[in-house]
Image: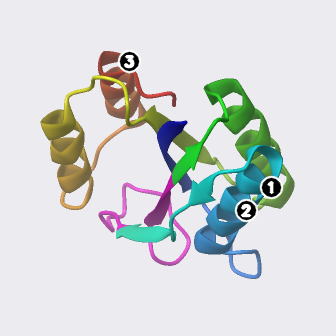
């Protein structure tokens, strides 16, 4: 059984499903497909700034999944659901980390805390994801 951390930001729009609802649906789909157990979805407030496109609150959602599902299956299910449910103009993001792997937890926490206080770019995120082995 693997322990996964699955995070999304779907850039929702007024009148569309919220990021939390979509994250809960993905968690349910993953459990239905592969069994296991998903935690509740947590909301993470990101920095609100004119240089960051967002619709209402600029938050991301995250949940833990304990399951025998593999990374490819997680990505297949989550990406398909994001594409089906996201707002037309959305630029959705999906991050998946195997919590049983070795990764630099302080670096990951530092990035998350900085995302709450400053403008970070996709380049920053992809760089860190590559360094830490996070699928992004």
Q: Residue at x 80, y 55 (%)?
A: 32
Residue 75 place in picture, x, y as percent:
69, 34
| Residue interval drawn in magenta | 45-64
Residue 66 place in picture, x, y as percent:
54, 48
Mark 3 or 1, which is nearer the eye?
A: 1
Residue 93 place in picture, x, y as percent:
57, 44
Choose between 92 and 64: the one closer to the eye.
64
Disc 2: CA contacts within 10 A as few (<14), some (14-19) or many (>=20):
some
Find out whether residue 63 is within the magenta segment.
yes
> What residue does disc 3 label?
130
Q: Residue at x 43, y 69 (%)?
A: 42
In the image, farthest residue toward the right: 84
User: Disc 2 to disc 3, how far (Cα)?
Assistant: 28 Å
Residue 71's image quarter?
top right
> What residue does disc 2 label?
28
The answer to the question of whether label 1 and label 2 lie on touching residues, with beta carbons closer than 8 A, is yes
User: Disc 3 to disc 1, how far (Cα)?
Assistant: 30 Å
Sequence-wise, which precedes: disc 3 or disc 1? Answer: 1
């Amino acid at each position: 059984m693997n322990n996964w951390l699955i995070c999304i930001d779907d850039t929702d729009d007024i009148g569309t499903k919220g990021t939390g609802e979509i994250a809960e649906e993905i968690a349910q789909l993953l459990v239905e497909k592969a069994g296991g157990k998903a935690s509740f979805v947590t909301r993470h407030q990101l920095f609100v700034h004119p240089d960051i496109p967002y619709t209402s609150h600029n938050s991301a959602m995250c949940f833990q999944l304990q399951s025998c599902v593999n990374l490819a299956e997680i990505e297949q299910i989550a990406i398909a659901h994001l594409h089906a449910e996201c707002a037309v103009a959305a630029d959705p993001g999906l991050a998946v980390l195997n919590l049983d792997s070795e990764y630099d937890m302080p670096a990951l926490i530092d990035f998350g805390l900085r995302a709450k206080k400053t403008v970070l770019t996709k380049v920053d995120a992809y760089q860190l994801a590559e360094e830490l082995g996070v699928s992004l």
